[in-house]
Image: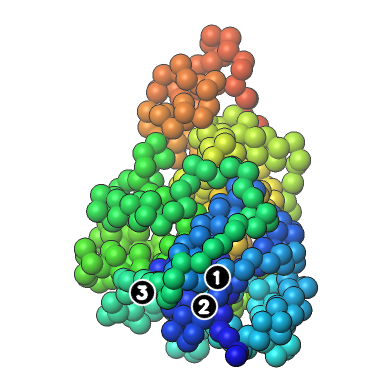
Amino acid sequence: MNKTIFWFRRDLRLHGNEALIHAINNGAKEALFFMCEKQWQKHNTSEIQLDMLKRRVAYLGEELAKRGIKLTVLEGEDFKGLPNKLKHFVEQNAIAAIYANREYEINELHRDKACSELGIDLCLYDGDVLSPPGSIVTKGGEMFKVFTPFKKAWLSVNCGRIFPVGCRLEAIGSAIDWVKPEILASNGESDKWPIEDHVIEQVVTQFIYEKVHKYDVQRDIPSIKGTSGLSPYLALGIVSVSELIGRIQSETPDVLIRTKSAEFAYVNELIWREFYRHLMFVFPKLCKGFNFNEKYNAVNWLNQESQFKAWCEGKTGYPIVDAAMRQLNQTGWMHNRLRMIVASFLTKHLLIDWRWGEAYFMSKLIDGDLASNNGGWQWAASTGCDAQPYFRIFNPITQSEKFDPDGTFIRKYVHELESVPAKYIHFPHDYLSAFGETNYSAPIVEHKAARERALAAFKV
């Protein structure tokens, strides 16, 4: 008898997964996952994210087995050979249809096209976005190239929509045995991030009830836990974006109308995520490392290896930049405000190509996401979709004074500065030199001179 199965991708959730529920309703009793480490590593996926992914897939295998559903994990290596492997699996197991969620990156789109060309019946859903790419367009039918008009159009389509909360996966039969395959062996690097649904549910609930109402004023302060902490789960599709908004609506029903509210400040971040996904789908050149704004192809990046190394290691001599980079290197995560600061510093102060920073972030981040990472870096470098001109250059000292005024965050990661008074913590070199202290890095560039150099480079 022909069968239906579900193909997990980066949508590693049992609940709030419409495509999975439809697969089950259409007779699926099995699910499939391809481990494509070589493909992912080729695109700089971090070890910590791969470890979290393996832990989560192993957890899914156990949870599905409790519900009478078998998970098969196959080694896919790279996407080029994956369609033929899938074809062989389909023929061996008499599979008639495969349900899955779409992925919008160019390699993933080519993979799905190749599967279809081999006669594999893919039933695809838009489970990773709130509105399908291509559905939010200008009056002329084109993709928006600036965020604010996109957001207004998105809201006009979705402001009356109630996002669903629920879509729970129930047992379809008696529990079955499942043995974790060796390919899912974890090295423990991501253990500080729980992958069990009941724990993640607690994190989501705490954010909805305790943090989202203060999100607008706390999200920029790196020394406190003012952000959602959900980005690694969004990156792997462990948490549904739709369900997150639905949960917020259950507490604040008019959140999509009250766009000046604290709650909407968080929803706004989810719309940014949506924007970058739509852009990547409509402009696949973004997957290939091209500038969105081609006029900036003329920028003469300096690309000094020694300065890039200092930036990577958190030894630039600018405390907020160094603390942020050390947080990334030590934890696999970085506060969003700090991502903007360090990206601006690399591209504007050091005139190093944004693609170097983009690749380094992906190689370290537990929440690495191609669309958002690319969009964020091109925003910082002024080469992407942005109404702001190239002369937006973050001053790392004033940013530090504004968002870490007493230096709490800086001292947590830059131990050389633990005893420096708050008055001097943001640029401590005169203070340190007065005491003959030399254990903290000297500034690798002078802010004013670097700013003028960047303005000249981008003006050309």
Mark sitting earlier along the chain (2/1): 2
Give the quadrant of the N terminus: bottom right
- Which disc is residue 165 wearing? none
Q: Mark 1 = which residue?
A: 70
Asked whether 174 or 281 is in front, the reply is 174
Q: How many marks?
A: 3
Q: Amino acid at mark 1?
A: Lys
Percent x, y of residue 195: 47, 53
* Residue at left offset 40%, top offset 29%: 408
The residue pinned by badge 3 equals: 167
Please give the name of the residue rendered at 41% of the width and 57% of the height, measured from the top-left corner.
197
Q: Which residue is mark 2?
A: 29
Callout 3: SS: loop
The mark lying in front, picked from 3 and 2, is 2
Q: Are marks 2 and 1 in contact (CB under 8 Å)?
A: yes
Whether tag 1 and tag 3 are in contact, CB under 8 A, the answer is: no
Mark 3–mark 2 Cα distance, whole angstroms, equals: 17 Å
Residue 289 at least partly seen: no
Relative vertical location of residue 396 with respect to residue 153 in this rendering, above or below: above
Q: Amino acid at mark 3?
A: Cys
Classify residue 161 as left or right of residue 431: left
Q: Amino acid at mark 2?
A: Lys
Please state the horizontal and vertical placement of residue 368, each as a whole percent of the image: 57, 55
Q: Position of residue 289 (x, y in %)?
A: 70, 64
Mark whose residue sits in front, 1 or 3: 1
**Callout 3: 10 Å neighbours few (<14), some, many (20+)?**
some
Rounded to the nearest whole Å, what is the CA distance between mark 2 and mark 1?
A: 7 Å
